[in-house]
Image (tube, rainbow, N blue to C red):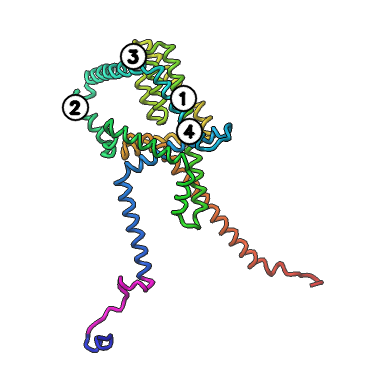
């Protein structure tokens, strides 16, 4: 039946193109727009569902940057192939950790048991004192409040909540980091291949800056961890505070997480110090503030000049958000994530500034040739 015969019989026919008319440019434009929003919604849903594996992958990349920094540093003195340098770095790391636990393993094991008992005893004393003042509910209610607070970290921590899950996650992080550190150029080319050709220069520049920023950030973190751990151990040993070696190791490990790690290490030092007596407790407080003051006003500013200078409030806010959303792993990776986002935003701002400057120069050039053209014509008696 033709359109004329349908109109002759009083039947109205829709003339606008439908979804199956793919040749129509309007339909193609609408489908393209809808596919963009649909793909964005799917991407957000996948990120929410797969956030724990994504955090493990990002932690592997952080570990790979750490190994890559060691390989690059070793390459300045040993002009040998990259694979051999990586092997040397891995052997040195394993040898350092193994030697520390071999020389102090028995002492650390004994102090770990003492630390658990000491913290439990001190915690019971503090709770009893505050409960006696009427400022806190009973022990049962307090246990429920702590359980609820720890549960608010989120369901995402359940994957690494057990010892087996934590060990499996650690193995995956180390494996990913080692594979990426062996040949990082392969993965860099793969990422560039997924970006349109016109944007690959800017993308490669941003990725290179991110990698460099992550390397120097981790180098600064390692320097701070080594300094805080060694200095805390030496000073606590001189002051006669028990478990000085274990407290130094925990302080060095917790120094990887700024702000929150320092607070936790301070609580541990003060609790152990007062368990041995008031003199050791006051010495623990003095040592904690002395180490943190020197680290905050001397070491960190010196390191920040060559690494990433992140505002403390921004770092603490990111740690709170990451720990609430992603758990302990998110708390440990909050600082690198903020550094990566900062680099990406700075690169985008530079690109926008270059584009604006180019457009402004082009506009001024056209304006001068349009307005200043007649004034450049020769004038005077000899014209």
Distance CA(mark 2)–CA(mark 4): 53 Å
Q: Which residue is mark 3?
A: 274
- Label whose residue precedes the other's in the sequence (3 or 2): 2
Q: Which residue is mark 4?
A: 87
Is residue 140 toward the left or the right of residue 368 in the image?
left
> Residue 153: horizontal and vertical position, in percent?
28, 36
In the image, what residue occupies the spot 30% across and 70% down? 19
Q: Are marks 1 and 3 in contact (CB under 8 Å)?
A: no
Number of residues whose C-alpha sits closer than 10 Å to that of mark 3, classed few (under 14), some (14–19) or many (20 or more): many
- Label whose residue precedes the other's in the sequence (4 or 1): 4
Quadrant occupied by the N terminus = bottom left
- Label whose residue precedes the other's in the sequence (2 or 1): 2
Is residue 381 toward the left or the right of residue 271 in the image?
right
Instruction: Pick whichever, 219 or 185, lies toward us.
Output: 185
Tag 2's secondary structure? helix
> Residue 43: horizontal and vertical position, in percent?
34, 52
- Label whose residue precedes the other's in the sequence (3 or 4): 4
Number of residues whose C-alpha sits closer than 10 Å to that of mark 2, classed few (under 14), some (14–19) or many (20 or more): few
Tag in front: 2 or 4: 4
Tag in front: 1 or 3: 1
Q: Are marks 2 and 4 in contact (CB under 8 Å)?
A: no
Q: Which residue is mark 2?
A: 141
93 to 154, vertically: above or below: above
Tag 3's secondary structure? helix
Q: Are marks 2 and 1 in contact (CB under 8 Å)?
A: no
236 to 11, vertically: above or below: above
Q: Which residue is mark 1?
A: 226
Locate residue 275: give its quadrant. top left
């Amino acid at each position: 039946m033709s359109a004329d015969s349908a109109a002759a019989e009083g039947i109205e026919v829709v003339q606008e193109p439908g979804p199956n008319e793919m040749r129509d440019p309007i339909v193609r434009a609408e489908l393209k727009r809808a596919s963009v929003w649909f793909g964005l919604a799917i991407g957000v849903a996948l990120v929410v569902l797969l956030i724990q594996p994504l955090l493990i992958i990002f932690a592997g990349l952080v570990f790979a940057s750490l190994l890559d920094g060691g390989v690059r540093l070793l390459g300045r003195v040993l002009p040998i192939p990259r694979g051999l340098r990586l092997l040397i770095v891995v052997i040195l790391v394993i040898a350092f950790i193994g030697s520390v636990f071999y020389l102090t393993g028995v002492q650390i094991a004994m102090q770990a048991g003492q630390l658990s008992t000491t913290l439990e005893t001190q915690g019971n004393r503090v709770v009893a004192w505050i409960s006696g003042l009427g400022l806190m509910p009973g022990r049962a209610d307090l246990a429920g409040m702590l359980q609820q607070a720890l549960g608010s970290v989120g369901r995402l921590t359940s994957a690494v909540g057990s010892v087996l899950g934590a060990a499996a996650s650690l193995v995956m992080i180390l494996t990913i980091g080692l594979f990426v550190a062996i040949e990082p150029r392969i993965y860099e080319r793969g990422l560039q291949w997924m970006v349109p050709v016109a944007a690959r220069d800017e993308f490669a520049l941003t990725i290179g800056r991110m990698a460099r920023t992550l390397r120097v950030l981790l180098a600064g973190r390692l320097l701070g961890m080594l300094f805080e751990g060694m200095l805390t151990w030496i000073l606590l040993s001189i002051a006669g505070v028990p478990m000085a070696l274990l407290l130094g190791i925990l302080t060095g490990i917790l120094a990887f997480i700024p702000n929150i790690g320092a607070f936790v290490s301070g609580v541990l030092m003060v609790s152990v110090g007062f368990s041995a007596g008031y003199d050791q407790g006051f010495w623990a407080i003095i040592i904690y503030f002395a180490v943190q003051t020197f680290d905050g006003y001397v070491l960190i500013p010196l390191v920040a000049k060559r690494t990433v200078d992140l505002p403390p409030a921004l770092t603490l806010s990111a740690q709170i958000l990451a720990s609430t959303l992603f758990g302990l792993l998110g708390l440990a990776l909050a600082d690198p994530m903020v550094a990566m986002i900062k680099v990406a935003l700075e690169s985008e701002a530079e690109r926008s500034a270059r584009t604006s400057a180019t457009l402004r120069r082009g506009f001024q050039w056209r304006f001068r040739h349009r307005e200043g053209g007649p004034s450049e014509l020769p004038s005077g008696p000899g014209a």
